[in-house]
Image (cartoon, rainbow, N blue to C red):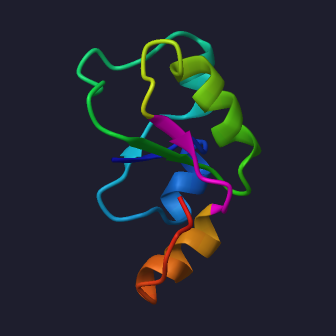
């Protein structure tokens, strides 16, 4: 599951199809959806990777399969459109 941790204005400009929008500001405020799955990988992304890394640190204790994608949204979208390896 892809999780976009960018803020709403960034999300509105574009996001990965099927991604869940969960802004870092909400995670930092403790707003984690109760139905967020714990048994599948959660691929966290933002614009460049820094906020996704912070989000991973927040989620990691309860969500051990959370992963920070080091590539930002634009590069991820380009890679997905070209069907390239994301180097997870």
**Residue that sits furthest to the bottom in the current view:** 82
Residue at horizontal 53 percent and vertical 41 percent from the top: 67
Q: Is residue 46 left or right of residue 19?
A: right
Residue 17, given in percent of the width and then of the height, sits at: 33, 65
Q: Is residue 76 left or right of residue 54?
A: left
Residue 34: in magenta span: no
Residue at 60% in and 54% down? 10
Q: Looking at the picture, how far across and down is residue 63, in whole percent? A: 42, 22
Q: In which quarter of the image is residue 47?
A: bottom right
- For this view, does 82 lie left or right of residue 53? left
Asked which quadrant contains residue 21, the reply is: top left
70 magenta-colored: yes
User: Is 29 above or below relative to 43?
Assistant: above
Q: Position of residue 18 (x, y in %)?
A: 29, 57
Q: What stretch is highlighted in magenta?
A: 66-72
Question: Of 7 and 76, which appears nearest the observer?
Answer: 76
Relative to 19, is 14 above or below? below
Residue occupying the point 29% across, 37% down: 40
- Give me the residue at 43% from left, 13% from top: 62
**Is residue 19 shown above or below 33?**
below
Percent position of residue 88, x then y: 53, 58
**Observer-nearest of 87 and 28:** 87
Q: Give the tally of numbered discs.
A: 0
């Amino acid at each position: 599951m892809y999780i976009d941790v960018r803020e709403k204005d960034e999300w509105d400009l574009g996001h990965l199809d099927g991604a869940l929008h969960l802004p870092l500001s909400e995670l930092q405020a403790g707003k984690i959806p109760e139905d967020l799955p714990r048994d599948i990988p959660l691929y966290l992304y933002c614009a460049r990777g820094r906020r996704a890394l912070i989000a991973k640190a927040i989620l990691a204790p309860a969500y051990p399969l959370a992963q920070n994608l080091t590539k930002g949204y634009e590069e991820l979208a380009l890679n997905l459109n070209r069907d390239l390896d994301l180097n997870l």
